[in-house]
Each structure stands twice: as C-alpha cells, then as structure tokens.
Image: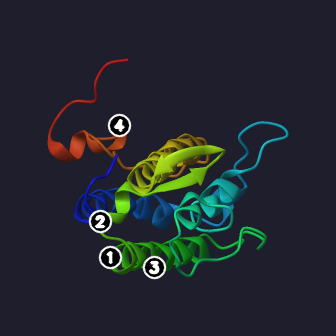
C-alpha cells in the first residue's frame, strides 16, 4: 500500500519506464502473437495497459486522458507505445496534482470492497506488473527480445559479462 504520493510517483515512474521499454520493442507483427485459442493476442494485452475505462485509477477518483477501452487496439506497435507514454504522463500528473498523502487514506469502493486510495494505487501497480509478465512471455514466443525488469533477461547476461545461467 502507498502511504505517500511521492512513493507512488517513484514506484510507478520506475515500473512504467520498464513497461515502456517493452512496448517500444514490439513490432507490428508481434501484436498478433496469440496466447492460446480463444484468448486475446499480445496486442490486446499491450493495449489493456493504455486505456482507462473501468479502471482502478478512475475508481479512485483520478481524472486523466487516456484512450477508451472501447477503442480498437491499433495495428501499429508504435501507436500503442506512444499512447502508453502519454497515458503514463497523464497518470503521474493526475496523482501529483489530485492526491495528497492524507487523501491516500480515504476509502473507495473497488470491486465491491472498501479499499483506501493508497491500496488502490498499489493494486493498480501490481496489475500492470502482472500484464507486463504476460507481455514478456508472448514477446518471447513472437521472437521479440525482452529486457529484465528485476534482473537480467537471458539475452542480457552476456552484456554484463556473465554466463547465461544453466537450465
């Protein structure tokens, strides 16, 4: 749970930078990478990180610009990456200007439960990290190099002068 606005701004700033690097690495072709039959492809997962409808942040009372969930995901990876960049900027500005440390303790109805706004921000951040994990798996399946979020990805070990760990 976040108890200060600054702690969210710092944490989300770091995590969104990692997400942005992954989105920037996507190719138009990779957006079609399926998860499994009957599930949405990589492009839908990436787009889910951009739109704002029915989202936790709106439920917490934040107002910011973002594409509608009803919008068809772009077929161009760069458009998704650019939309994420703009949405992230809007989220950071909204938190900076619309919340205070005291307001983080206020309760909101989230999924039929009472959460503090600080808990909601924390859940939102974990939600993004969850979908970022899905992205990395689908990116690997699509042949798109990934980066390590909390340590080197397999492709990065050599660049830090270390052998790839054995399987």
Quick one: label 4 or label 3, which is nearer the N terminus?
3
Residue for badge 1: 96
Q: Are marks 1 and 2 in contact (CB under 8 Å)?
A: yes
Q: Secondary structure at mark 2?
A: helix
Residue for badge 2: 9
Q: Locate residue 75 relative to residue 52 in the image: left or right.
A: right
Residue for badge 3: 90
Q: Distance between the Cα atoms at labels 3 and 1?
A: 10 Å
Q: Residues within 10 Å of mark 3 (few under 14, many from 20)?
A: some
Q: Residue at x 66, y 52 (%)?
A: 42
Percent of width and height locating residue 153: 34, 40
Q: Distance between the Cα atoms at labels 3 and 2?
A: 12 Å
When the figure is inspected, residue 162 is found, relative to residue 116, above or below; the finding is above
Percent of width and height locating residue 12: 35, 60
Nearest the eye: 16 or 106: 106
Q: Distance between the Cα atoms at labels 4 and 3?
A: 33 Å
Q: Distance between the Cα atoms at labels 4 and 1?
A: 36 Å
Percent of width and height locating residue 76: 66, 73
Quick one: label 1 or label 2, which is nearer the N terminus?
2
Q: Secondary structure at mark 3?
A: helix
Residue for badge 4: 154
| Labels 2, 4: front one | 2
Q: Locate residue 24 relative to residue 36 in the image: left or right.
A: left
């Amino acid at each position: 749970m976040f108890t200060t606005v600054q702690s969210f701004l710092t944490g989300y700033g770091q995590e969104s930078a990692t997400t942005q690097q992954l989105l920037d690495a996507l190719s138009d072709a990779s957006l079609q990478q399926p998860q499994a039959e009957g599930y949405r492809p990589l492009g839908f997962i990436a787009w889910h990180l951009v739109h704002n409808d029915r989202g936790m942040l709106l439920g917490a009372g934040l107002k910011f610009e973002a594409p509608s969930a009803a919008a068809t995901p772009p077929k161009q990876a760069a458009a998704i990456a650019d939309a994420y960049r703009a949405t992230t900027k809007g989220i950071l500005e909204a938190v900076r200007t619309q919340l205070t440390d005291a307001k983080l303790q206020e309760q909101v109805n989230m999924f039929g439960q009472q959460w503090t706004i600080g808990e909601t921000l924390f859940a939102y951040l974990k939600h993004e990290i969850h979908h970022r994990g899905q992205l990395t798996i689908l990116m690997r399946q699509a042949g798109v190099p990934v980066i390590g979020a909390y340590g080197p990805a397999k492709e990065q070990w050599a660049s830090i002068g270390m052998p790839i760990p054995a399987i």
